[in-house]
Amino acid sequence: MSTEVRGQLRSMSTLRSEVEGHMDNLAMRVDRVERDVEYLQNKIPDSSIVEIEETVLEQEVKEAQEMYIGDVYYIKSQKIVKKAGSTLGSWMKDPTKGSSKIYFFSGMMNRTVLEFASLKSFTSSGSSGQVRAITLALPWQGTGAVVFHGFAYYHHAGTRNEVLKVHLWNGTVADRALLPGAGRMPAYALTPYTLLDLAVDEMGLWAVYADPDLRGNLVVSRLDAGSLAVEQTWDTSCKSVHAEGAFFICGILYVVYNSPSGGRSSIQCLFDIHDTTLTEEVPVIFFPKHYASHSGMQYHPKDKQVYAWDDGYQTIYKLDMKRKSPAREV
């Protein structure tokens, strides 16, 4: 009888695991359907961009906003712009003053970048005449590429820690440099193909990577955009475990975390190079969608928005911000 009971218990345990697995899959499928509906709404005339106001989210973090002293209060809204390219990639708006160009890096390893004249031309289904394909001399790796002052900066595919600076006009290499200590492990555990993540903010060009000698914590380096020389490096307390991406705002690194099985992305750690933000007083900042998987995130200094790649959906997050002090324009 004891043996029979144990067998029944094992069967029940197996059945429970199967049910839990089905529930998780159902939740993910429901979320995908929601995103497909939001994307299809983009096709309605005069409604190319869908903005989702998160009233519930605002209530969840209302009290935290009162005590937060950093630049970002919370993620105010989400705009699903388009669904295009690979499930992995990155996209961004050119931060150069007066430019409205959009750059599209599809895939975790490629050498063709698409340049669109504007966000409107990017969202338009008949914009073939307004897109330019740029063939780079050397391929990129990961989803950490950025565009800055007419150049693409990215991790050279097949190398451990080489950063390339490539002309967007003709795809030729303008400069290259090795980033000491980088490339020995993924920058973010949930995006294992990205060893180096580059970022641009009001202060210039940054590189983010994880250091196994620091138990996998993130390291940030400020780079000279002209020569790629490392100007200064900081060790942070932000962990790469369960991280999926990060972005810079005014010299502050915001690290985004998630669960390995997918869930609600949130900012759980930040590092301020100025030491003016008390990280122990910063609340968790949630992203609007309950299920998300960001493979690329780039902040636009002038728009004050984050351009994210969410499982093949090109998404824009509007930030509710409070600037503490003026920052130098890029």
Image: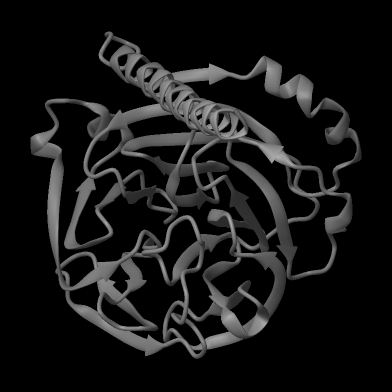
Residue in the image at 19% along x and 50% along y:
114
Q: Hey, which residue is sitting farthest left in the picture?
A: 129
Residue located 41% across and 63% down the image: 192
- Scheme of colours in the image: one colour
- Residue at (85% x, 63% y) in the render: 276
Q: Is residue 6 above or below residue 298?
A: above
Q: Is residue 54 left or right of residue 16?
A: right
Q: What is the tally of numbered marks visible in this picture? A: 0
Residue 148, how many percent across, how many down? Answer: 40, 64
- Mark yes or no: residue 148 visible: no
- Percent position of residue 142, x then y: 34, 63
Q: Is residue 139 visible?
A: yes
Residue situated in front as seen by the camera: 32 or 315: 32
Relative to residue 133, is residue 222 drawn left or right? Answer: right
Q: Position of residue 115 (x, y in %)?
A: 22, 49
Quadrant showing the N terminus: top right
Which of the 4 image quarters holds residue 119? top left
Q: Return the residue found at the far top.
A: 45
The vertical placement of 53 against 111, above or below, is: above
Which residue is found at the position 71% from the left and 39% from the top?
285
> Quick check: 68 left or right of 163?
right
The reply, left or right, for residue 222 in relation to residue 94 is right
Please determine whether, in this image, residue 324 is positioned above or below residue 285. Answer: below
Q: Is residue 210 above or below residue 128?
A: below
Across and down, in percent, residue 314 comes to 36, 37
Taking the view exactly as shown, the residue that stands out farthest to the front is: 1
Taking depth in this image into account, of 9 and 142 the one nearest to the observer is 9
The quarter of the displayed image where residue 309 is located:
top left
